Amino acid sequence: MSALLDLLMGILRQQTIGGAALELAAIAAPLWLAALVGLLIGWAWRPRWAGVVVGVGGGGGDNNAQHQAAAHLLPTPPPPPPARATATAVVSRNEAPAVVPRTVVAPAAAAPEDEQLAVNTGDLMHLWRLVEEKDGGPSWIHMMDRTLPTMRYQAWRRDPPNGPPQYRSSTIFEDASPEVVRDFFWDDEFRIKNSWDDMLLQHETLEECTRTGTLVVRWVRKFPFFCSDREYIIGRRIWASGKTFYCVTKGVPRPSVPRHNKPRRVDLYYSSWCIRPVESRKGDGSMTACEVLLFHHEDMGIPWEIAKLGVRQGMWGCVKRIEPGLRAYQVARTAGEPISKCAAMAHVTTRFNADELITEENTEGSSSNNTEVEKPKHWTNNIPKVLMIGGAVALACTFDGGLLTKAVIFGTARRFAGPGGPGRR
C-alpha cells in the first residue's frame, strides 16, 4: 500500500495537469477493465427474472406480437378438477320447461363424457379459483366505485404479462333473487328485445346439451363506426352450489363455422359470473340482495392500451343500463310472461358441493408445501459476492487514501460478503 501511495504522490508532483491525468488514467485503466469483465460475467449468471423484464419491455410494440402472445392465454384448458368434485356432480333441472335440443353434443366413448363438452368441470375450477382469489394471477387494481339507490358497482383491472387486460367487477342489486338474475343474464332474446345490451345484434344457438345445460351460441356484436362488427362463438354452462351459481361463458373453437372479414371473429373471449345472495344494505340482516362477480377479458383486435382507455371511458355508461333492464325483467316474470328458450336452458344446472372444493384445494396446497425441498446452492452463486468485494477493493485503491472513504467502501463490501447478502440485519 505504501508503494502505491508513493506512486500516486509522484504522479501528483507532475508539473502539468495533463501529464498527471495521463498517469492516473494508465493506473485506472486495468481496474476499469476488470470492472467491465465483472459486469459481463455477472450478466452471464443473471437471474431468470432479468430476462423476463427485458423481454416484456416496450409494451407499445407490434399488435401482431400481442395477438400471438394472447393465443397462449385461454386456449389452454384449466387444470382438471378434483375427482371428488366430479363424482358428486349431479344434474338438477329445477322444474324447467321442456327444451327441444337443436344439436346434442355426443361425447367420445374413449374419454369421460363431461370432458368432451364445450365447457367442462375444469372451467368450473378456474372460475372458482378466480372468485376465491386463488388463481395465482397479478393483483387487482381498483378502477371504479359507483352507487345508485338500488345498485352498487365496483370494478378492478389487472394486466397479465402475456394477454389482454383482465377485468373484475362486483355488482350488487337490491331486492333481486339469484335465480332471476341468472335467467336475466342468460336470456339473449330479452337482451335484444329490451335493448339493455345495445351491442348485441344477433344471436343463434349452435349446439345444446339438455342433460347438462351446455350451450354453444353465436353472437354478433356492434362495434364503433371505425371498427367492423365482431363475431363470437361462445360456450356456456352453469353450475350451482346451494343458491350460488357459477356461470361460465368463453370462446370455443368451431372450425365448422366459416369465418368472414365482416364481422370479424374474436377467438380469445372469457366472460363468467358468480351470482350469489348477499345481505341487503338496508341493515335488517335479510339476504334479499344479489351480488354478481364478473370476470371478463377478450382480444378484440384493438391495441390493448387503446382498448383499456375505451373500457375506462365507457364502462359506467354500459353498466348503469343493466339495472333498469333487470327491473323490467322482474316485472315481466311477475306478470307471468313465458320465459324464452335461452332462459329455460339456464334452469338446467349441474349441482356440486363448493365446500368439497375448498377442502380439496387446501389439501393439495398443504401437500405441495410439504414437498418443497431447498435446492443446494451452486458455487456460481458466490460469483456476484466476489465481484462486489473485488470492485470495492479496486475503488478503495483508486480513490484518495482518506479513512472515511475506505470505511464506507470496505463496509459496503463486508455487508454484501456476509451471510444473507444485502438483506442481512
Image: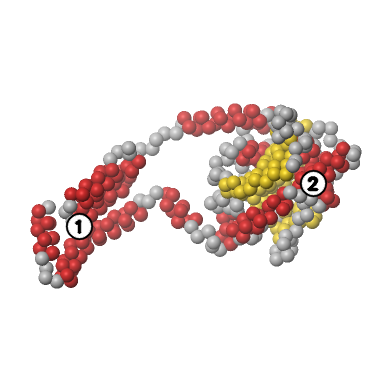
Q: Secondary structure at mark 1?
A: helix
Q: Amino acid at mark 1?
A: Thr
**Residue located 50% across and 33% down the image:** 368
- Give x and y (percent) for residue 271: 68, 47
Q: Quadrant of residue 261?
A: bottom right
The answer to whether the residues at label 2 and label 1 have Cβ atoms under 8 Å apart is no
Which residue in the structure is indicated by mark 1? 398
Choose between 178 and 84: the one closer to the eye: 178
Q: Count residues near mark 1 (Cα–Cα under 10 Å), then give few for <14, some for 14-19, many for 20+.
A: some
**Residue located 22% across and 63% down the image:** 29
Which residue in the structure is indicated by mark 2? 324
**Residue located 58% across and 32% down the image:** 361
Question: Label 2 to label 1, Cα distance in Å?
Answer: 76 Å
Q: Amino acid at mark 2?
A: Pro
Q: Secondary structure at mark 2?
A: helix
Residue 119 appears in the picture as rendered: no
- Give x and y (percent) for residue 210: 80, 39
Of the 4 image quadrants, the one containing the C terminus is top left
**Residue located 83% across and 48% down the image:** 190
Q: Quadrant of residue 326?
A: top right
Above or below, 322 relative to 306: above
Q: Count residues near mark 2 (Cα–Cα under 10 Å), then give few for <14, some for 14-19, many for 20+.
A: few
Label whose residue precedes the other's in the sequence (2 or 1): 2
- Give x and y (percent) for residue 174: 75, 37
Q: Nearer the viewer, mark 2 or mark 1?
A: 2
Above or below, 205 relative to 65: above
Choose between 43 and 90: the one closer to the eye: 43
Q: Quadrant of residue 117?
A: top right
